[in-house]
Image (tube, grey):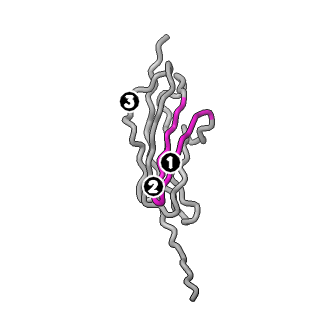
């Protein structure tokens, strides 16, 4: 007997930057967490700053069958004040399976 199990792909149900939107400091590394759920297979998370993929940061991810969490650790500069931080959840096996959460960041610096 042969059973063909065809799994259905599901787009991300929600995506949320769960870290409070506090004032960020240029004096130390900043950590921001994003979570997404509902996607099958699990969504891939991407971080963007002003529309560009963040490359100069440490990103730690955790994943289960329908949950993905991402911890972004980065250093901000005064030039980053007012820029838009985006966490994008994408299920490449589901056409149009992208969801985002975004926020404007605020950077404090001492001269």
Q: What is the residue that sits farthest to the right in this orientation?
A: 55
Marks 2 and 1 close (CB-CB < 8 Å): yes
- Residue drawn at (57%, 35%) of the image: 58
Q: Give the mark nearer the N terminus: 3 vs 2.
A: 3
Marks 1 and 3 close (CB-CB < 8 Å): no
**Is the N terminus in the top left, top right, bottom left or bottom right quadrant?**
bottom right
- Packing grade of label 2 (10 A; few <14, some 14-19, many >=20) is some
User: Circle 3 is placed at which residue position?
Assistant: 22
Image coordinates of residue 5 in percent, x first then y, are 54, 78
Secondary element at tag 2 = strand
Disc 2 to disc 1, C-alpha distance: 8 Å
In this rendering, the answer to whether 105 lies above or below 36 is above
Is residue 47 located in the magenta-colored stretch of the structure?
no
- Residue drawn at (60%, 41%) of the image: 53
Q: Give the mark nearer the N terminus: 2 vs 1.
A: 1
Q: Which mark is residue 67?
A: 2
Q: Which residues are magenta?
A: 56-74
User: Circle 1 is placed at which residue position?
Assistant: 62
Disc 1 to disc 3, C-alpha distance: 24 Å
Frontmost of labels 1 and 3 is 1
Classified by dominant secondary structure, the portion drawn in magenta counts as strand
């Amino acid at each position: 007997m042969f059973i063909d199990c065809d799994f259905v792909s599901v787009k991300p149900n929600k995506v949320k930057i769960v870290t409070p939107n506090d004032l960020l400091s240029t004096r130390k590394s900043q950590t921001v967490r994003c979570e997404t759920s509902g996607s099958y297979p699990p969504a891939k998370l991407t971080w963007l700053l002003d529309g560009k993929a963040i490359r100069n940061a440490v990103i730690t991810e955790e994943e289960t069958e329908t949950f993905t969490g991402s911890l972004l650790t980065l250093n901000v500069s005064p030039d980053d004040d007012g820029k838009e931080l985006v966490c994008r959840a994408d299920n490449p096996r589901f056409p149009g399976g992208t969801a985002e959460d975004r926020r404007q960041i605020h950077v404090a610096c001492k001269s």
